[in-house]
Amino acid sequence: MAAPTTTATVSSALAALLLCAAAFLAADAASGARHDPKAKAKPAATGAVLESACGNITTSHYKGPGLTVDFCTRALYPETRAMSASHPRDLALVAIDLARSAAEDAGAVVGYELRGPVADDDQADWSKDTALTLRYCRIDYWAVARTARVCRAMVREYDPWVEGHTSGNLLPYTYLECADRMMDAALSCWNHITFDGEVKKGVWEEVNAAASWANLARAMVGQMLGIPDDDGPY
């Protein structure tokens, strides 16, 4: 008669052991979720990320047309990707895309002005100085558009949810250098056109837009890295 009692005791002990194991696994899984940087760090995907990033801009540190909080919000609010951003990295991607597009538009406009409304490739009847300015501007916008491709690839691969030397991210100054190259190239044409009354009227809208978007792209890359504008190389 002892065997049934022993069997029942063993079964009860096994059931208790299984319950303890299940409770341990559940607790471990919950702990792992709490320590997963991706699980704990991602904010809600709302326009709050956009408002915070634009609000952190230090407006005095951007050359050419400058950069204001108002321009940042008005420029990015219409963009669906910006409104659904979960990190400033998403905003940086949007701004880089738009900076590239603006540079391509500006390059087309200065190229048209250089050639004039004629069928051949002869330059329009500009002074030598203005013709040279337009040529330099085409080179500048070529540089902006192609640098934007490089910057975008770097930013797209940036993982904001991991830290340390094993994160796979590049050093912060590498991202800033790429964005600075875009900004400086756009500023170069802006500076030339600003003082060239001969051609300014025909190209200013696109030239000013290209410089503004390049400034914004640089600002959003800084926000992506958590580096205040005060620390930027200007």
Image: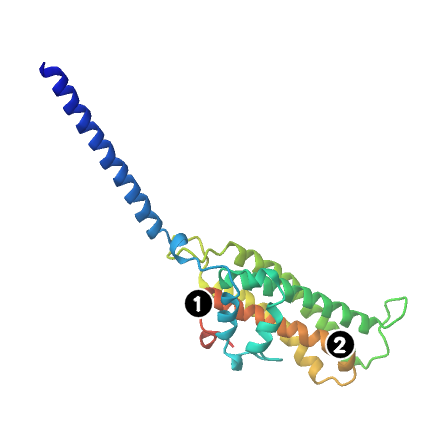
Quadrant of the image occupied by residue 68 = bottom right
In-front residue for pair 154/96: 96
**Quadrant of the rendering where the N terminus is positioned:** top left
Vertical placement of residue 224 versus 72, above or below: above
Residue 210: give its label. Answer: none
- Other-residue count near label 2 (Cα within 10 Å), few / some / many at <14 / 14–19 / ≥20: some
Q: What element carries label 1?
A: loop
Q: Of the residues shown, which amino acid type is indicated by label 2?
A: Val
Residue at figure coordinates x 30%, y 42% from the top left: 26
Q: Of the residues shown, which amino acid type is indicated by label 1?
A: Gly
Label 2 sits on residue: 203
Residue at figure coordinates x 50%, y 75% from the top left: 55
Residue with the most extreme left position: 2
Q: In terms of sequence position, does the residue under pointer 1 or pointer 2 come before the other?
A: 2
Residue at figure coordinates x 58%, y 73% from the top left: 72
Residue at figure coordinates x 67%, y 70% from the top left: 140
Q: How many labels does the image show?
A: 2
In-front residue for pair 197/27: 27
Residue 226: give its label. Answer: 1
Q: Position of residue 110 (x, y in %)?
A: 76, 72
Separation of marks 1 and 2 at Cα, in angstroms: 35 Å
- Give the mark toward the camera: 1 or 2: 1
> Horizontally, is 133 left or right of 82 in the view?
right
Residue with the most extreme right position: 119
In-front residue for pair 40/59: 40
